[in-house]
Amino acid sequence: AESGVLERVHVSDLDFTALKARVTACTACRLCEKRTQTVFGVGDEHADWMIVGEAPGENEDRLGEPFVGQAGKLLDNMLRALGLDRAHNVYIANVIKCRPPGNRDPQPDEVAQCEPFLKRQVALVQPKVIVALGRFAAKTLLKTDATISSMRGRVHTYEGVPVIVSYHPAYLLRSLPEKSKAWTDLCLAQATYRNVLD
Ligand code: URA
């Protein structure tokens, strides 16, 4: 555990190790009461690609890693199609670091408490492109209540980083026709990434 002195250091000044420790010890909202553990993030801390999801589910809460259930398998397949995997050139994190009980929607105050952690992760990773998966990721990063459908197909920006919005893989599992749209979104993300490299 961190000492009281360290806790007074602002989140925006923490390095990856200290940030992870801060998240692990976090009791800022009610979600700390029922979690098994926090789920910080996984992947290459200097990745060009960052994937942002919503919150840990049951499997993530148990294993301490984002996207390890069914939705995660689909995400892994999507990443593989781009020539990426969770150990190479991609960093995966959620807006919320603790599982909401019964996988309920995160509440606004929970998002507000947790958001500085994601913001710091983005600042540390310095990705060249962010893919926001689902309404919560898009809403949190882009400060909008717009639907995913209306936000797709354009390049948005978060803290100077291009953001592509797409459907959450858990939604795609329930609505297979949308999979081709998600593929279109990933192609836009890849084109955006290549543009940044040029
Ligand atoms: N859904 C998410 O948004 N994040 C996870 O880590 C798992 C499922």
Image (cartoon, rainbow, N blue to C red):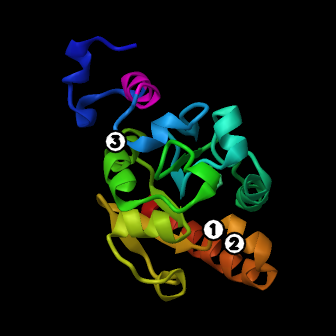
What's under tag 1, amino acid-wise? His
What secondary structure is the stretch in magenta mostly built from? helix
Residue 66 vs residue 109, the one in the foreground: 109
Q: In this view, does 67 lie to the left or right of 100?
A: right
Q: Can residue 195 be seen in this view?
A: no
What's under tag 2, amino acid-wise? Tyr
Look at the image and give the residue range highlighted in magenta: 17-25
Q: Position of residue 67 (x, y in %)?
A: 68, 49
Q: Where is residue 36 in the image (x, y as percent from the top left)?
A: 61, 32
Q: Position of residue 96 (x, y in %)?
A: 47, 49
Q: Does the residue labelled 1 lie within 8 Å of ligand 1?
A: yes
Q: Is mark 2 within 8 Å of ligand 1?
A: no
- What's the CA distance linking mark 1 and mark 3? 22 Å
Classify mark 3: residues with Cα within 10 Å, few (<14), some (14-19) or many (20+): some
Q: In which quarter of the image is residue 124?
A: top left
| Residue plotted at (39% across, 31% down) | 26
Q: Quadrant of residue 163?
A: bottom left
What residue did someone put label 3 on? 120
What's under tag 3, amino acid-wise? Arg
Say which mark, if any, is on residue 171.
Answer: 2
Q: What element carries label 1?
A: loop
Residues at discs 1 and 2 in contact (Cβ within 8 Å):
yes
What residue did someone put label 1 on? 168
Q: Where is residue 151 in the image (x, y as percent from the top left)?
A: 46, 82
| Residue plotted at (68% across, 82% down) | 181
Q: Is residue 85 left or right of residue 70?
A: left
Mark 3 or 2, closer to the camera: 2
Q: In this view, does 63 lie to the left or right of 30?
A: right
